[in-house]
Image (cartoon, helix red, strand yellow):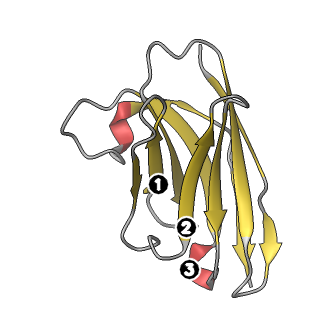
Amino acid sequence: QVQLVESGGGSVQPGGSLRLSCTVSGPSSSINYISWFRQAPGKEREGVAGVHISTGNKFTAESVKARFTISRDNTRKTVYLQMNSLIADDTGRYYCAAGRVPYGEWILTLHFYNFWGQGTQVTVS
């Protein structure tokens, strides 16, 4: 069973930065991507960025591409989300998720992810 633990959330003023961390444990044979999703109050959960655990191939949603960067450290089994120039619309709960995304499919498709962390809150105000 893959387990994910997020950290690094908090409250920040507009224009500020945060770095989220997702520490992964358990067998990785059933997954190939680890991604970040977020959910604002009253809104659907949306994909933010993902990274292939072996190749390092990355994908970032267009809405945050200029400001957010995903990276991985395999020695620490940790995936990071660096968030810069934060705006109020970035407020929400951020979740780390792991899953197996078939080749050719869009990486941030929710139903490919069957392992989820508890989330970490990000508030920009």
Q: Residue at x 71, y 47 (%)?
A: 21
93 shown above or below 77 = below
Earlier sequence position, callout 2 versus callout 1: 1
10 Å neighbourhood of mark 3: few (<14), some, or many (≥20)? Answer: few
| x, y percent for residue 66 | 47, 76
15 shown above or below 39 = below
Q: Quadrant of the N terminus?
A: top right
- Asked which quadrant contains residue 72, the reply is top right
Q: Which residue is mark 3?
A: 89
Q: Which residue is mark 1?
A: 49
5 shown above or below 93 = above
Distance between mark 2 and mark 3 Cα atoms: 13 Å
Please report contact status of discs 3 and 1: CB closer than 8 Å, yes or no.
Answer: no
Callout 1 amino acid: Ala
Please report contact status of discs 2 and 1: CB closer than 8 Å, yes or no.
Answer: yes
**Helix, strand or loop for disc 2:** strand
* Residue at far left of view: 104
| x, y percent for residue 27 | 58, 12
Please report contact status of discs 2 and 3: CB closer than 8 Å, yes or no.
Answer: no
118, 8: nearer the viewer: 8
| x, y percent for residue 109 | 32, 45
Q: Disc number at residue 68?
A: 2
Q: Residue at x 38, y 43 (%)?
A: 110
Distance between mark 2 and mark 1 Cα atoms: 8 Å
Q: Disc number at residue 116?
A: none
Callout 2 amino acid: Phe
Callout 3 amino acid: Asp
